[in-house]
């Protein structure tokens, strides 16, 4: 294995990069190159983080309460979207008649941004969690369908024909050939769906949320509290990173033949 492919080297480089940015942030704040009115200093950031985590909290809750609520909303929207989007994409990719029937409707929905559904979500479902899940559902649904569809269409036809000659048909063909062949593209779609949920999360939690990282960001903006805004942004980033790592673990176990 080459040095560039060594995971330990990549991790070390990443840690060094982050450490370098933190050092630049600290000295920039101390020297005055970074104005504290525009961007918080490390001291301000850690004070805000301590307030949110262990102090009186912020926006009607502490960090773990906001975090758990946001993760709950993300997982509901993500699981609901992929549970429908992945099978639908596989079906459209495998069956030309299904594609002809469903694709015109899908092409109408596809260009609509997830945030454009906010007014209808409020009208249909009110200001509760159901409206937020609906918005995240639309953010995750389109990538799941497109990549599942593409994964099926990219399977070499000789592979399918050879499988049929060996006796695979019906459900066994789908289970043993179609789904494994489409899995790399499916997981690409799942990553994009997860990113879509994270992107839509903040906007979704502006809809009368009682808790959530989006509410932290919204309230901090109203209060003109840059340090808390940065704490909320970091919390969203860490949450997204953790969920992506979890998805990567699921991918490795789902495709053991691709493990390195």
Image (spheres, helix red, strand yellow):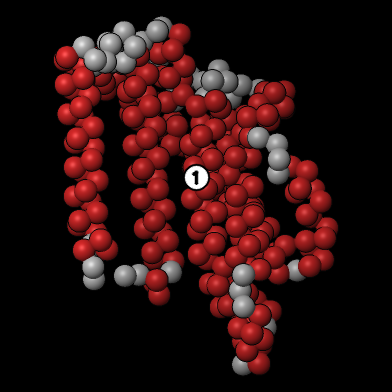
**x, y percent for residue 130:** 60, 31
> Is residue 75 visible to the viewer in this orientation of the structure?
yes
Q: Is residue 180 above or below residue 83?
A: below
Task: Name the foreground residue: 165 vs 36.
Answer: 36
Task: Name the foreground residue: 172 vs 45.
Answer: 45
In the figure, residue 249 lies in which quadrant? bottom left
Instruction: Look at 41% across and 19% down and name the residue there.
Output: 216
Figure label count: 1
**x, y percent for residue 146:** 64, 55
Task: Name the foreground residue: 1 vs 115.
Answer: 1
**x, y percent for residue 229:** 37, 18
- The quarter of the image holding the N terminus is bottom left
Q: Is residue 209 above or below residue 108?
A: above
**x, y percent for residue 19:** 19, 36
Instruction: Look at 40% across and 75% down and name the residue there.
Output: 257
> Is residue 47 visible to the viewer in this orientation of the structure?
no
**Crowding at mark 1 (Cα within 10 Å: few <14, some 14-19, many 20+):** many
Instruction: Look at 21% across and 19% down and name the residue there.
Output: 28
In the figure, residue 161 lies in which quadrant? bottom right
Instruction: Look at 63% across and 29% down and name the residue there.
Output: 115
Q: Which residue is mark 1?
A: 194
- The quarter of the image holding the C terminus is bottom left
SS at circle 1: helix
Task: Name the foreground residue: 119 vs 16.
Answer: 16
Q: Is residue 100 left or right of residue 153?
A: right
Q: Is residue 233 above or below residue 260?
A: above
């Amino acid at each position: 294995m080459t040095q560039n492919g060594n995971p330990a080297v990549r991790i070390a480089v990443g840690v060094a990069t982050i450490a370098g940015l933190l050092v630049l942030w600290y000295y920039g704040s101390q020297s005055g190159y970074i104005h504290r009115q525009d961007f918080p200093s490390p001291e301000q950031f850690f004070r805000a983080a301590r307030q949110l985590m262990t102090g009186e909290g912020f926006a009607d809750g502490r960090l773990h309460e906001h975090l758990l609520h946001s993760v709950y909303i993300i997982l509901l929207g993500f699981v609901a979207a992929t549970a429908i989007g992945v099978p639908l994409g596989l079906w459209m990719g495998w069956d030309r008649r299904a594609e002809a029937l469903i694709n015109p409707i899908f092409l109408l929905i596809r260009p609509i941004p997830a945030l454009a559904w906010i007014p209808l979500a409020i009208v249909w479902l009110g200001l509760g969690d159901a409206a937020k899940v609906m918005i995240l559902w639309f953010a995750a649904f389109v990538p799941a369908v497109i990549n599942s569809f593409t994964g099926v269409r990219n399977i070499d036809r000789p592979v399918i024909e050879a499988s049929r000659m060996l006796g695979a048909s019906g459900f066994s063909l789908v289970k043993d050939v179609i789904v494994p062949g489409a899995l790399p593209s499916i997981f690409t779609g799942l990553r994009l769906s997860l990113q879509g949920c994270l992107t839509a999360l903040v906007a979704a939690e502006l809809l009368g949320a009682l808790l959530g990282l989006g509410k932290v960001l919204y309230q901090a903006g109203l209060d003109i509290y840059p340090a808390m805004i940065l704490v909320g942004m970091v919390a969203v980033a860490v949450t997204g990173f953790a969920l992506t790592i979890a998805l990567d673990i699921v991918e490795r176990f789902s495709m053991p033949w691709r493990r390195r």
